[in-house]
Image: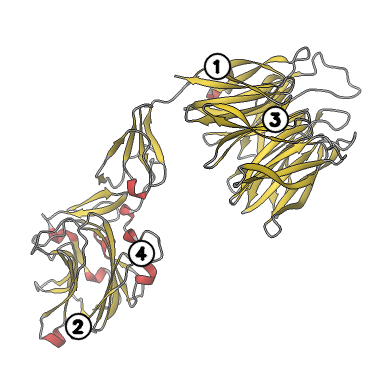
Amino acid sequence: TDLRPLDILSEVVPADRLARGMRVFQVQGVRGFQLAASRPRALGFPASRLFIHCDRFPEEFSIIVTLRVLSVPAKRNEYVFTLMAEESPSVLVGLRYAPDKLHFLFWSQEHTGGWQTRVTFPNVSLSDNQWHTLVLAVSGQSFSLTVDCSIPKDVVVETPFPASLSVKRASFYLGNRRRRKGLFTGLLRQLVLLPGADATPRICTTMNFKVATLSVPAVLQDLPVKPASNEVLKYPYETDTKVTLGSRPPCTKQEKAQFWFNASQRGLYLCNGSAWISMLEVKQRLDYVEEYQNLVTNSETMGVEVFTIPKVGLFAATANRYTPPGSAIYKWTDGKFVPYQNIPTYQAQSWKYFTIGKKIFLAVANFEQNDSGQEFSVIYKWSRRKKKFITYQRITTHSARDWEAFVIEGEAFLAVVNHREGNNHNIDSVIYRWNPRTGLFETNQTIPTSGAYDWEFFTIGPYSFLAVANTFNGTSTKIYSHIYIWLSGSFQLFQSILTFGAADWEVFRIGDRVFLAVANSHSYESGMPAPSNFYAINSSIYELNITAQMFIKFQDLLTYSALDWEFFSVGDDSFLVVANSFDGFTFSVNSIIYRWQGYEGFVAAHHLPTVGCRDWEAFHTTEGSYLLYSSAKEPLSKVLKLKTT
């Protein structure tokens, strides 16, 4: 035979259906066959289907079995498999299980006068309702059994396994010896014959030794938790279902295929081995928005960043205009944001939270020089000992507006938007690459920008993109903003889109569709007639067209000096909220939540009174869902709670 695994179990399963007398059960998230005693011959097949080129059983081999044994009564034996000649009741090769013992049987006419030899492995306890993988390695007089990749049990007998055992007119039988008596009553997942080798090194490479696999029939392999369509399962299976009530239980491989009913949310969830997947639940719908907290800030707030530090809590960092007192970090405590840490900043514009491995960072974009006349933006690192952010790296910037952190092909990057240098708005913004050897960010690429406000990184399939919001080139806000694509180790121009004082890009997905929204802040062009209103202009939503390989305008929405978009979801509904900051007359302007209405696009749903709204952040806690907006015109930001039905 070829030295390849011979999958005995798969030979019993036809390509398009289960064999008669076989049912599929799922236990502890693992599938196996249960065999019926009514037609034992139906669970067999000719040995010639496995031994195509040679009619001799291999002299050296391994047998790999994954099974779940039920409690076997004393003095009872159950067969895992047998190989029997058609004209004889004798077992040529077989594996039999008895309480606390495993017997390997073989026929050796040349040495024993036609009697069967039995090799017994004592103290093999499998009746614990758990899955187990056995590897039986045979070579001459040596027989070795490994259970769940533990220390092998070795047995040496007088009679070696025959060097030339004929399998002419012989058949394999699954879980029986061609009779109802001795039928295997447990579950069988894997039964493989590997000629010429000890399979233990090939099997014992996974952490889950009890269900380690070399070859498993397709019907027993894991299926998607949710079918791709409404089609009926090709191979129906049964499972020992258990439904847990109460608070959220753990979901590990041990709980795979178990259900949890959340009575408070009226939801039914299925464990897929790592997370609870919603199967049936009453979906929340946004009813209205209520004012939840007035967050008094150090000064006017240009931007806000909400983030979670694992095992520490939820935080919000505000980018405040004046120093002193600088900018502040707040921690969510007892359902409210409370002051946690002050950090000296210089007309801070925005914060960016990111991680590299186990390191936690927070970068601030400073717009002005410090007290010494130096212009730096600063990266802070979280100190687990001090439970504070401490200065880590200073980077020279020019009226920085925004940071964007991202990872490409395992490497970490940090991009800064430089708005202007003196009166020159047409300058380079910079992309920095993390150097793991020095532990610092180093310049990797510069990209020409014009009074830029924002970077937005996103991925589509294997491709990485970086969009810049260009705002002003010195004479006009009617300029092109650009989308770059990562190719051959650098960002290259992918598409240019005409914008009007672009202040923000927001990428989001609805189903399989990819959208990109731009916030246009004002329309100004030197030497051209002034419009009736510089600030009442359309902001636009673009959709990726796969065929054209570009973003195509999808919808225009009238905005008032829009400075930010934020996408969020409630239940199955998708929303966009815009930061309207100025209508040409007053900073007290309604910002609007738009609801996704499918064919109609985004439709205004809620009008929220705001004052000089600069930034929106959506976040969730165990108590509910919230929106936080920052005001660039008063030292007061607001937390709004989304009330659902």
- On the rendered structure, is 130 left or right of 90? right
Q: Quadrant of the N terminus?
A: bottom left
What residue sits 87% from the left and 38% below the top? 421
Please name which of the two marks, 2 or 3, marks the residue nearer to the observer: 3
What residue sits 75% from the left and 37% below the top? 365
Mark 3 / mark 1, whichever is N-terminal: 1
- Compared with 510, 577 (above or below) is above
Distance of label 3 from label 1 (alpha carbons): 21 Å
Point out the residue furthest to the bottom here: 111
Contact (Cβ within 8 Å) of mark 4 with mark 3:
no
Distance of label 4 from label 1 (alpha carbons): 58 Å
Helix, strand or loop for disc 2: loop
What residue sits 26% from the left and 51% below the top? 17
Find disc 1 in the rendering and name its residue.
290
Distance of label 4 from label 3 (alpha carbons): 55 Å
Query: How far across and how far down the image is residue 495, in percent?
Result: 72, 40
Find disc 2 in the rendering and name its residue.
157
- Compared with 382, 424 (above or below) is above
Residue 482 visible in the shown view: no
Please name which of the two marks, 4 or 1, marks the residue nearer to the observer: 1
Q: Which mark is residue 303?
A: 3
Distance of label 2 from label 3 (alpha carbons): 79 Å
Mark 2 residue crowding within 10 angstroms, few (<14) / some (14–19) / many (20+): some
Helix, strand or loop for disc 4: loop
